[in-house]
Image (spheres, rainbow, N blue to C red):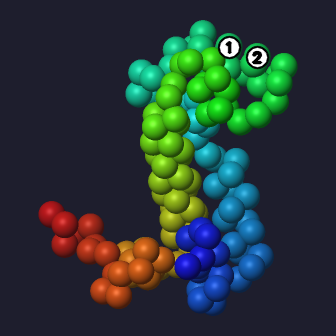
Amino acid sequence: MANSFVEFLVDRGTISVEQGTGVVEWARLSRDLLGAIAMEHGLLSGEQICAVVQHQREGGGMFGDACIELGFLNRCEVEVLLRAQEMRTLRCEVERVILGGLVVADDIWGLLGGYYGCEQGLPAASDAA
């Protein structure tokens, strides 16, 4: 399985490598930061985020690891936040390929289903209602 949805689209020839690179870069720049997601859900305060950033400046490392080291979050909470960030990044990628005209909106559910290994694809939004 491709590591990312964009790699999946490139591997199957739906988009070119150049288009995929553009989508990934755009999604990276549009990505929600882990601290922002944690704050949105009441897991971290602004003061705690500042403390984490200062801890990172002093010792390096990843944001989630610094949260654990400082006792603000546990490993499970960081893993859930990382999955949430991953899903938000996927949403950004999907929006970019559709709004950029790289994929027809009606085809996205089938492509996502293929990416996740579902032969029938995923149900269209109109089917879920």
Q: Which mark is residue 98?
A: none
Find numbered disc 1 in the image and state the secondary structure of the residue it sits on.
helix
Q: Which mark is residue 54?
A: 2
Marks 2 and 1 sit apart, C-alpha to C-alpha, by: 5 Å
Give the residue type at disc 2.
Answer: Gln
44 or 64: nearer the viewer: 64
Disc 2: CA contacts within 10 A as few (<14), some (14-19) or many (>=20): few
> Which residue corresponds to the image point at 69% horizontal and 56% vertical from the top-left?
26
Find numbered disc 2 in the image and state the secondary structure of the residue it sits on.
helix
Q: Quadrant of residue 9?
A: bottom right
Q: Residue 103: x and y, percent?
A: 52, 78
Residue 39 is at least partly visible in this image: no
Quadrant location of the C terminus in the rendered image: bottom left
Q: How many marks?
A: 2
Residue 68, placed above or below residue 22: above
> Which residue corresponds to the image point at 64% horizontal and 23% vertical from the top-left?
69
Identify residue for label 1.
Answer: 51
Q: Quadrant of residue 49?
A: top right
Residue 2 is at least partly visible in this image: yes
Q: Residue 59: x and y, percent?
A: 83, 24
Quadrant location of the N terminus in the rendered image: bottom right
102 or 20: nearer the viewer: 20
Give the residue type at disc 1.
Answer: Ala
Q: Residue furthest top?
A: 47
Q: Residue 55: x and y, percent?
A: 75, 19
Residue 108, placed above or below residue 33: below
33 or 116: nearer the viewer: 116
Disc 1: CA contacts within 10 A as few (<14), some (14-19) or many (>=20): some
Q: Marks 1 and 2: in contact by CB < 8 Å? A: yes
> Which residue corresponds to the image point at 68% horizontal and 20% vertical from the top-left?
52
> Which residue corresponds to the image point at 64% horizontal and 75% vertical from the top-left?
7
